[in-house]
């Protein structure tokens, strides 16, 4: 069992909606979930200053500091700038994707499983600066497939091992992996 807590920041001005999100998170993650809540962007911004979060869930339409300005604040915060953010809003704003391509949005009303599934995905993927790009991952997969094809087509042979002399190249074609 992993003793580490998963830290969530839930930012929602509607107390009932906030409580429902917190209950969903606690049901989905059990004792591993540690939820910090805030009623608006200003309160949430204060909580960002001294706490790192694994996932931030925020509404967009809030008093004092709306969700878009709060997200901007998060991205400038050295502790949480790479924390995954999920927007849960009755008024999703697709234009935010241009500025924040790693942002995820869920439209209200939503299914409880939809929220937990999106959070689980973001937790598994980790902080934004630690994610591997698709091009790098696809290149690695292609290289591994080619290597396996070569290994499976190759003929096994037993050769007497011998010491290579300094400056001498090894004979034949050599495939290796790490």
Image (cartoon, grey):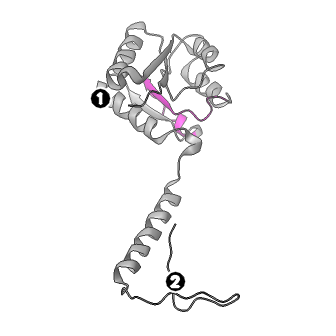
| Residue placed furthest toward the top | 15
Q: Which residue is mark 2?
A: 174
Q: CA distance from mark 2 to mark 1?
A: 50 Å
Quarter in which the N terminus is drawn: top left
- Image x and y of residue 21, in percent: 38, 18
Is residue 96 shown in magenta?
yes
Lower sequence index among marks 2 and 1: 1
Q: Which residues are magenta?
A: 79-98
Apparent side of residue 155 relative to residue 61 in the rendered image (left or right): left
**Crowd class of label 2 (few under 14; some 14 to 19; many from 20; radius 10 Å):** few
**Crowd class of label 1 (few under 14; some 14 to 19; many from 20; radius 10 Å):** few
Name the residue: 56% across, 18% down.
Answer: 66
- Image x and y of residue 52, in percent: 59, 25
Overall secondary structure of the magenta stretch?
loop
* Front-most of residues 102 and 161: 161
Exactly how many numbered labels are in the figure?
A: 2
> In the displayed structure, would residue 84 be above or below residue 142?
above
| Residue placed furthest toward the right | 167
Residue 81 in which image quadrant: top right
Is residue 45 shown in magenta?
no
Secondary element at image label 1: helix
Mark number displayed over residue 113: 1
- Image x and y of residue 166, in percent: 70, 87
Label 2 or label 1, whichever lies nearer to me, is 2
Name the residue: 59% across, 87% down.
Answer: 163
* Front-most of residues 89 and 50: 50
- Image x and y of residue 138, in percent: 46, 62
């Amino acid at each position: 069992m992993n003793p580490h807590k998963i830290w969530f920041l839930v930012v929602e001005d509607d107390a009932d909606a906030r409580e429902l999100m917190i209950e969903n998170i606690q049901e989905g993650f059990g004792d591993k979930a540690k939820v910090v809540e805030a009623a608006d962007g200003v309160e949430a911004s204060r909580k960002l200053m001294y706490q790192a979060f694994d996932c931030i869930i925020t509404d967009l339409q809030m008093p004092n500091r709306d969700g878009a300005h709060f997200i901007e604040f998060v991205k400038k915060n050295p502790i949480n700038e790479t924390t995954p953010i999920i927007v849960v809003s009755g008024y999703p704003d697709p234009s935010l994707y241009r500025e924040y391509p790693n942002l995820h949005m869920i439209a209200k009303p939503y299914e409880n499983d939809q929220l937990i599934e999106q959070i689980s995905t973001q937790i598994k993927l980790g902080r934004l600066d630690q994610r591997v790009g698709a091009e790098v991952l696809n290149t690695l997969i292609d290289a591994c497939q080619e290597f396996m094809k070569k290994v499976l087509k190759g003929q096994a042979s037993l050769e007497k091992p011998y010491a290579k002399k300094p400056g001498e190249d090894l004979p034949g074609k050599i495939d290796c992996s790490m």
